[in-house]
Amino acid sequence: MELLNNLYTGFSIALTFNNVVYCLVGVLFGQIVGVLPGIGAPTAIALLLPLTYKVNPTSALIMFAGIYYGVAYGGTITSVLINVPGESSTVMTCIDGYQMAQKGRAGAALSVAAIGSFLAGTISIIILMAFAPALARFALRFGPPEYFALTAMAFGLLTVFGGEQPIKTIISTMFGLLIATIGLDVVSGMPRFAFGVPQLLGGIDFIVIICGMFGVAEVFSSIEEPEEGEIIKQKMHLRDLFLTWEEWIASRWAIVRGGVIGFIVGMIPAGGITTASFLAYLGEKRFSKHPERFGKGAIEGVAAPESANNSASISGFAPLLALGIPGSPTTAVMLAGFMMWGIRPGPMLFKTNPDLVWGLISSMYIGNFLLLLINIFLIPAFVAMLRLPYTIIMGFIVIFASVGAYSVNNNFFDVWMMLGFAVLGYLMRKLQYPIVPLVLGLVLGNLSENSLRQALLISGGSFSIFFNRPISLLFIIAAILAYLTPVLRWAWKSVGHPKAQVNA
Amino acid sequence: MRLANLIGGVFVLILGLAVVFFSLQLTYYSEFGPGPGFLPLWVGIIISACAIYVVIDLLRKQGGKEEFFKLRTRLGLQIFITIIITFLLLPLLGFAIGLAFFIGVTMRMMGKHRWAPCALTAIITAIGIHFIFISWLTIPLPRGLIGW
């Protein structure tokens, strides 16, 4: 009953004309961002964030959420038609999607991606509606030790999912924590790492860093190594988009399995939509009675990862809304948005801002439905967008990043800082230091440090407080295991399993 | 790339040690629990330890085939310098004209467009920035000497 009440509250907000327009703009923009190379969801949201300061937070968040799950739909088009993933979350779609396109079934590949995303996404929203408030109620028991342990676990999980070089992942996370300490210390009022520069006393704004590291840094990388591919020229009629009965039979359970894997992985801090699509593809291949068909145009190879990435983009809102802990760079940028509007996500959000929470969640039903329609009827328009010269896209990114950085405090110092972080981001990418851990370290840095200090204050300096409380202990054990993953992997390899790859 | 990674590793090590040095000047532990120097000190120690591992690991390994400087790195560098020049000019030209200048120059620089379409795109960009950011969103962007 409570669920229906919440749904009613949500739809009464999400269905207002204004919010439907914001949702439509969000999903359209997300779809475009997904198609265009060199710009992803976190960049797009970060570039728009400073411009939405005066917009109603619920409407702006509805738009940002639309961008987030819209991107996963858009990236599919380039994966299928030119074998270049528009987004990292659609990398797996290239494998079988492009093969299908070469066999003249591009329409079916795009269609199953849209239908799978819609179905998995919608089921995810239903689970999110039931699960998120329960998680928030559970999180009401959290005190400073639990929050510190939770952030420690999130940082630890980054080393599991963060790439091939866990040591560089740790360095990157520490960079994020370090940047978060710049400015006045909230407890003692002492300046840290400001070196007498007055602009640094308030800390470095998150938007400045994101605009540089995701926006302009990506421009440098894309100029150096452009993603180019040949569009498969194929006349697509509406009837080509319909699946054959055999295709539907082959993909229906892949959609369900992909959706479930996506939902679970999306909720894990640092899991993210890319990992979700990866695991869904590998899982589907393992589950299939004909794994040899994978890589040769198996429709399940498109259905599973596409359902998973959409499902994960929705379940990622559970830890963000209920715990205030973002699991991916995109939700981290959204957390910055919450802070900009003076709203603190976490267990109390469901009580203090029910309109925002339920309006946002309900808008996802509308957004997913709009995306389904867009992806059935408007695909040619998005394919045409692939002809847009990169110089124009690059120009837009630099314009939005510069305006965004300037508008944070209305000064040029931030614009130069943004450029500095762009160079740092470019070099980090080039030397294979992952960026995502830095962003999560940065955004969770204050919560982590403050919880640690409060916990040790409560315990009189004894670290036993983290081990005496069951929830905190659980998180700490998970964190330790996560940090030990590289050692476990090394041990696994050296006892005679040289081909084992945990981080596939 | 190995050399670049090595330089990167040494840079990270220096940064880590610098963080340790500056953290030691902050209060590590106060009567109210951990002080402002507590977390930064441990962050600095972890960064330094990880950097030492990265450097030693690189010294033991053979260099890969991948080069740091690629065919189009020079173009990326040119764009970077253009951005610096643009940012230096922004207080004089204002955001609308300054960023339009950037678009025009980079379109030309990327080599595929004639001057006329570059100039036209720049003019449309300037008008777009002025009306979207300054007039519509009322962001107080500097308007430069021309006042636009």
Image: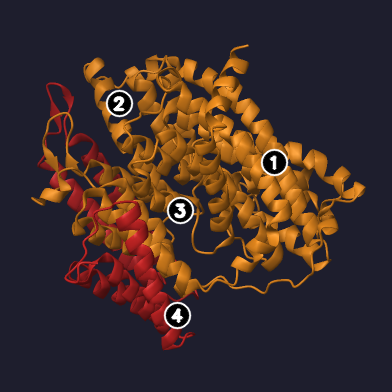
Chain colours: A orange, B red
Q: Which residue is mark 1?
A: A118
User: Disc 2 on helix, strand or loop?
Assistant: helix
Which tag, 1 or 3, sits closer to the chain's start? 3
Say which quadrant the N terminus of chain A sits in. top right
Q: Which residue is mark 2?
A: A451
**Location of mark 3 (residue):** A44
Say what secondary structure mark 4 lies in. Answer: loop
Residue A126's x, y, as percent? Answer: 65, 27
| Tag 4: amino acid | Arg
A13 lies above or below A141:
below
Q: Which residue is mark 4?
A: B72
Pointers 1 and 2 in contact (CB under 8 A)? no
Distance from disc 1 to disc 3, alpha carbons, whole Å, reads: 22 Å
The quadrant where residue B109 appears: bottom left
In the image: residue A377, left or right of residue A124: right
In the rendered structure, which amino acid carries the disc numbered 1? Phe
Q: Which amino acid type corresponds to the residue marked 2 in the rendered image?
A: Ser
B5 or B128: nearer the viewer = B128
Task: Please state if A392 lies on the left or on the right of B32 as rendered.
Answer: right
Residue A208 image position (x, y, % from top left): 30, 52
Q: CA gap, disc 1 to disc 2? A: 39 Å
